């Protein structure tokens, strides 16, 4: 998982065989088949390398210049990074070795350590730098500094941690040089995969969404994704086999407190019997006999509730293990490519670890420089209507519209989707208000900032960073008890509009300062591997120092808006857009929403809105056995939702503690 923030674990590149001009190598960033950025690398002298890295992701994206110097053995002895990061914050990072010590400064660190040829883990490094890092690993092995061979090895990192590499395969694809696939691990996450030439020079980093590859080979991204995929899936398959327990006869959770989110009530001293993938019986522990062959989990003093739903994900396989460990058994995907259908089948077959992909959103945006990163990109309304048909034919449940859609297209797209029994949700298109989108057929508004922007008119181009910065600067000015906001609440109630606020997605952008552990991780800070903890301290704040109080006030008012949605009887769905669902629930509770209602937003309401409440959302005989056993009582203390002792998905049993241990995390 790459929680909360974009994480680049490693950095740097050697001069390439494919230099386009002298000793310069050019790379292109490719998003859904389109070039959206570049990186170039220059070897200025024998041991001196310059990098420039930039791309555009809907107004976000870095522009970083890097200078790296190595010694004659290939060991990196100095590095300097300057420019702006993904969220346009200033980058000024340095590392150097002097007098037997290593020194480094970045957004929040100013530190030093005795130098023993460790590798500095850059906060602002580029993907292409990984070539130099691999060379350094091999140089360390040659000097006997680390345990390494030609195909695997490791090196200690600064400030802490260990980087490991393993060569997985060598491939010979049509019109490509011979390439090696290398997996890097050790940071507390799932593996990162990179492609190198057989002499160790960086060639590409590829995913289905976003890739970096040597210029001129852009059309080969899909070939490399296809070649890489079996190795990714094998990792997750092995993990799933070791982490999934299927009680042969059945499962009993005895003498526990059972929570019913529909009513908000609990029943004590209950036993729940599970057979295969369904709940067999629920009853008083004194009266309900447990069959002799059933596996028994003692629920004494614990809290049993339906499995959690994350209603706003863009699912990647590396998120699956962590989601299960956090009690998430069901998710709604809000936009992905069609590979997601295959991933859903792999999860259903227990070939990879993850929640059930219960509800799928077909993502549609208008093609152009600010188009969304996935899904179907269209050029006109007929193509958009055809995309709705395509998604319906593939079994998708709803349509998600994005920021570049023409406002005039919304009503006919919504009418088409509704005619096919599909819901419509999404970002509010640029130059349109949320109020207009609801009148045009939106069933659901995605993200709280889209509600904020409703009160500043339809002249704002929300395809760029203004959709984030304007709410941060002005959300505090909206009176949630005032006539304008209450009138909008009335409109939402009239249309039965649902809201997916993803508060946690905005919290760090509006409030996290450099060196402060991201709030979603503060409750588990002592459990984090060193690299994960450091990454979670890399600020995502998008304002300036002088705007800190304004952004903080605006975020607090966004929380008040979610409370006002609840107070007005509107359905709020708990989703994260890539964060930790447990923290999203903590934010709702802190906003003043009763804890029973908060848990309902992550269990009963998702099942109800998705039309799956006949099988999910409550603990009753005949329903799917998607449950979490909590060592605490989140009705009294919402932070107890962090203490998931057992996750059960369709009768399969998972231990969060065992999952976290696989990645070097601690747990309660």
Image (spheres, grey):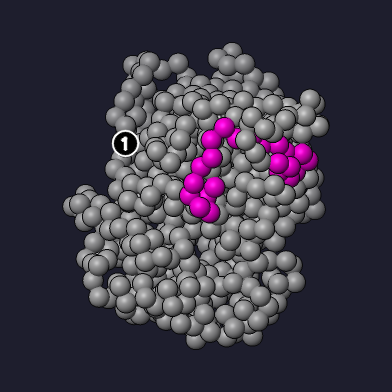
Q: Looking at the picture, does residue 627 appear above or below residue 153?
A: below
Seen in the picture, residue 455 relative to 206 is either above or below; the reply is below
Residue 186: x %, y % from top left: 56, 28
Residue 148 seen in the current view: yes
Q: Quickly name the residue at label 1.
A: 515
Q: What residue is drawn where x is 36% and y is 52%?
A: 593
- Residue at 64% of width from left, 52% of height from top? 616
Question: Is residue 274 magenta-colored?
Answer: yes
Q: Which residues are magenta?
A: 260-281
Give left or right: position of 118 versus 490. Answer: right
| Residue, far top | 144
Q: Was residue 388 drawn as part of the magenta stretch in this picture? A: no
Where 513 falls versus 468 (above or below)? Answer: above
Observer-nearest of 655 and 51:
655
The answer to whether any part of residue 624 appears in the image is no
Image point 44% across, 39% down: which residue? 634
Residue 450 rendering spot, x and y as whole percentages: 40, 68
Instruction: Please name whichever residue, 33 or 648, is drawn nearer the observer in this view of the structure.
Output: 648
Asked which secondary structure carries label 1, the reply is loop
The part of the image, by quadrant, that contains residue 339 is bottom right
Q: In this rendering, is residue 251 above or below 424?
A: above
């Amino acid at each position: 998982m790459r929680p909360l923030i974009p994480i680049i674990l490693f950095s740097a590149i050697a001069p390439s065989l494919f230099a386009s001009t002298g000793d310069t190598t050019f790379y292109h960033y490719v998003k859904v088949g389109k070039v959206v950025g570049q990186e170039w690398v220059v070897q200025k002298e024998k041991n001196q390398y310059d990098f420039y890295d930039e791309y555009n992701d809907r107004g976000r994206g870095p522009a970083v210049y890097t200078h790296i110097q190595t010694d004659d053995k290939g060991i990196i002895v100095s590095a300097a990074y300057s420019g702006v990061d993904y969220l346009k914050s200033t980058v000024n990072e340095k590392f150097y070795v002097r007098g037997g010590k290593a020194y480094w400064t970045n957004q929040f660190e100013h530190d030093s350590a005795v130098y023993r040829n460790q590798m500095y883990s850059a906060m602002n490094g580029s993907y292409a730098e990984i070539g130099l890092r691999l060379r350094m690993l091999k140089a360390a092995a040659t000097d006997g500094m680390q345990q390494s061979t030609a195909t695997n090895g490791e090196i200690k990192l600064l400030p802490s941690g260990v980087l490991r590499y393993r060569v997985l395969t060598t491939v010979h694809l049509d019109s490509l040089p011979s390439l090696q696939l290398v997996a890097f691990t050790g940071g507390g996450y799932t593996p990162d995969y990179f492609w190198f030439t057989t002499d160790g020079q960086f060639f590409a980093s590829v995913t289905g969404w976003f890739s970096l590859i040597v210029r001129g080979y852009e059309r080969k991204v899909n070939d490399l994704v296809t070649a890489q995929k079996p190795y990714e899936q094998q990792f997750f398959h092995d993990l799933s086999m070791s982490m999934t327990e299927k009680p042969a006869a059945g499962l009993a959770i005895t003498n526990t407190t059972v929570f019913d989110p529909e009513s908000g009530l609990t029943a004590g001293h209950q036993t729940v019997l599970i057979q295969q993938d369904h709940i067999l019986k629920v009853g008083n522990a004194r009266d309900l006999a447990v069959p002799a062959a059933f596996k028994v989990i003692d629920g004494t003093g614990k809290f049993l509730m339906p499995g959690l739903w994350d209603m706003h994900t863009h699912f990647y396989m590396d998120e699956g293990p962590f989601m299960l460990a956090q009690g998430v058994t069901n998710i709604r995907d809000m936009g992905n490519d069609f590979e997601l259908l295959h991933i859903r089948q792999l999860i259903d077959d227990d070939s990879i670890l993850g929640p059930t992909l219960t509800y799928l959103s077909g993502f549609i945006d208008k093609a152009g420089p600010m188009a969304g990163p996935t899904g179907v990109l269209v050029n006109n309304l007929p193509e958009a209507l055809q995309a709705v048909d395509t998604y319906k034919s593939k079994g998708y449940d709803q349509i998600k519209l994005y920021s570049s859609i023409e406002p005039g297209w919304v009503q006919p797209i919504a009418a088409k989707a509704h005619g096919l029994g599909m819901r419509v949700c999404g970002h509010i298109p640029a130059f349109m208000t949320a109020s207009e989108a609801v009148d045009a057929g939106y069933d659901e508004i995605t993200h709280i900032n889209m509600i904020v922007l409703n009160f500043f008119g339809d002249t704002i181009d929300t395809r760029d960073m203004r959709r984030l910065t304007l709410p941060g600067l002005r959300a505090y000015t909206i009176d949630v008890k005032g006539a304008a906001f209450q009138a909008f609440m009335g409109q939402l109630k009239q249309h039965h509009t649902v809201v997916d606020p993803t508060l946690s997605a905005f919290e760090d952008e509006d409030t996290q300062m450099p060196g402060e552990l991201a709030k979603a991780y503060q409750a588990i800070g002592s459990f984090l591997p060193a690299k994960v903890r450091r990454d979670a301290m890399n600020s995502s704040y998008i304002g300036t120092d002088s705007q800190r109080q304004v952004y903080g006030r605006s975020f607090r008012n966004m929380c008040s808006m979610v409370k006002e949605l609840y107070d007005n009887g509107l359905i709020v769905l708990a989703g994260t857009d890539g964060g930790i669902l447990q923290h999203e629930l903590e934010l709702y509770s802190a906003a003043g929403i009763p804890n029973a209602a908060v848990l309902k937003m992550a269990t009963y309401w998702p099942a109800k809105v998705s039309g799956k409440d006949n099988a999910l959302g409550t603990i009753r005989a005949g329903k799917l056995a998607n449950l979490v056993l909590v060592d605490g009582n989140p009705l009294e203390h919402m932070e107890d939702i962090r203490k998931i002792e057992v996750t059960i998905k369709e009768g399969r049993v998972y231990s969060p503690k065992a999952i976290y241990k696989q990645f070097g995390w601690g747990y309660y």
